[in-house]
Amino acid sequence: MSRKPLVVGNWKMNGSRAANAVLLAGLKEAGPWAAEVAVCVPFPYIAETALALTGLSVAYGSQDCSAHESGAYTGEVSSAMLADLGCRYAIVGHSERRAYHHESDQLVADKAKAALAHGVTPIVCVGETLAEREAGQAETVVRRQLAAVVHTLTHCIGEIVLAYEPVWAIGTGRTATPADAQAIHAVLRMQLHAATKKGDAIRILYGGSVKPDNAAELFAQADIDGGLIGGASLKAADFAAICAAANRRAAS
Ligand code: PEP
């Protein structure tokens, strides 16, 4: 089964209109790529990012979305609004939201459902903490997080992108070894297989301190279909190099 590699930049709460213009111009110069490439930017910058990417094959999206349709939810952004702005993707369940905003597995699943209802593809993040890994619970935790999404989306589960992001590897400079990452990806792939006949077609990204010098080895693993990139997505040259590493997988 050939899955088109996908590399997604997660800018987190970084950027300014001026800095974004430089970064996006850098990407414009570096592309195009055989892999699919997207940037998930802070809400206020979505519209301007859309304009800057006009005519390019780089997609864009958000870093979260509301589980609600519309109404009295001050500060939230609905997936209908994201669709209105042309977003292809919305990250949901990033570990920073699970940790700092106490998002439960079920809330993450509800957000994924809301995104899909408006044609926005959720990039569902799962991952264990260091304590959970050291306690031998990595598989149990990611399987539990994915199970909520499988249960909620039922026959639509084939429409998601999944991202395995071990919490201890995010922004720390510590990366899972390619073999360790592949082992969890294989577990997640089996779980998707059990849930849907389309399990083989679902892309599973790896995220956690992916850099130009480790991307190729990670992307060479059988079940790693690209990356969710935080820090390194803020430098056009680094992000472009990671996209090029995914290009090689696309070509192989
Ligand atoms: C992320 O925030 O999704 C991430 C993977 O961050 P970093 O690449 O900086 O570890």
Image (tube, rainbow, N blue to C red):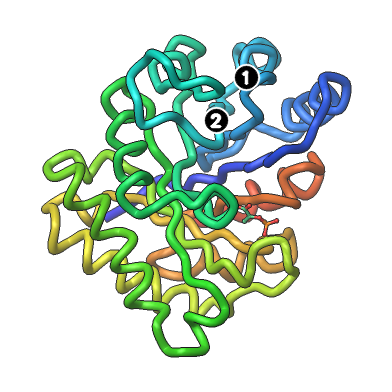
Give the CA distance from mark 1 to mark 2.
Answer: 7 Å
Q: Secondary structure at mark 2?
A: strand
Q: Residues within 10 Å of mark 2 (few under 14, many from 20)?
A: many
Q: Secondary structure at mark 1?
A: helix
Q: Amino acid at mark 1?
A: Ile
Instruction: Look at 88% across and 21% down and name the residue there.
Output: 18
Quadrant in which the N terminus is drawn: bottom left
Vertical relation: 128 (above or below) 34:
below
Residue indicated by mark 1: 46
Residue 66 in view: yes
Residue 105 image point, x, y percent: 35, 54
Q: Quadrant of residue 22?
A: top right
Residue indicated by mark 2: 62
Q: Amino acid at mark 2?
A: Ser
The front one of 105 and 54 is 105
Residue 106 image point, x, y percent: 30, 49
Q: Quadrant of residue 160?
A: top left
Instruction: Look at 34% across and 61% down and name the residue there.
Output: 145
On screen, residue 95 versus residue 30, left or right, reads left
